[in-house]
Amino acid sequence: MIDDSTASRRPSAKKRGSRVDFVVDPFRQREFVFESGLEEQWRNVLIADPRVVELQEQLPPVRFLDNENIDRTHWFDTRHVGIDGRGHE
């Protein structure tokens, strides 16, 4: 059985030509959502890399103040943890 994505948000097609879909990781038996062709390709590389032990997509939003003190929000597309235990966004 394939587990659902653990993404904090489900991307939606914003414009004509958007590439919003999911790929199934055959090793983790879980779906991973993406919202662009580049994200899909990067996700496939991470899934195939035996040094990646944990993979998360569409993480919860991060709030920050920009250089002009304006409150902003950013969503990281991917976070992966390697066999060394270090996380990478």
Image: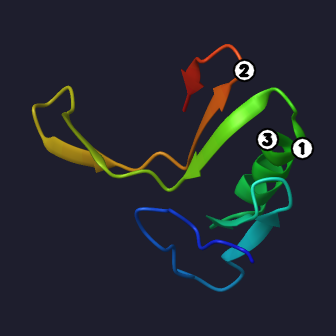
N-term-proximal mark, 1 vs 2 = 1
Residue shown at 49% from the left, 62% from the top = 7
Residue 56 point in image, percent of width and height:
57, 48
Q: Residue furthest bottom?
A: 16
- Whole-Å distance between the Cαs marked 1 and 2? 14 Å
What amino acid is labelled 1 in the image?
A: Ala
Asked if disc 3 and disc 1 are in contact, CB closer than 8 Å, the reply is yes
What amino acid is labelled 2 in the image?
A: Ile
Q: Secondary structure at mark 3?
A: helix
Q: Secondary structure at mark 1?
A: helix
Q: Which residue is mark 1?
A: 48
Q: Quadrant of the C terminus?
A: top right
Residue 25 point in image, percent of width and height:
80, 60
Q: Which residue is mark 2?
A: 83
Frontmost residue, 66 versus 63:
63
Q: Residue furthest top?
A: 84
Q: Nearer the viewer, mark 3 or mark 2?
A: 2
Q: Which residue is mark 3?
A: 46
Frontmost residue, 47 versus 58:
47
**Vertical position of residue 73 compared to residue 31: above or below:** above
Task: Give the crowd class for mark 1: few <14, some 14-19, many >=20 residues within 10 Å.
Answer: few
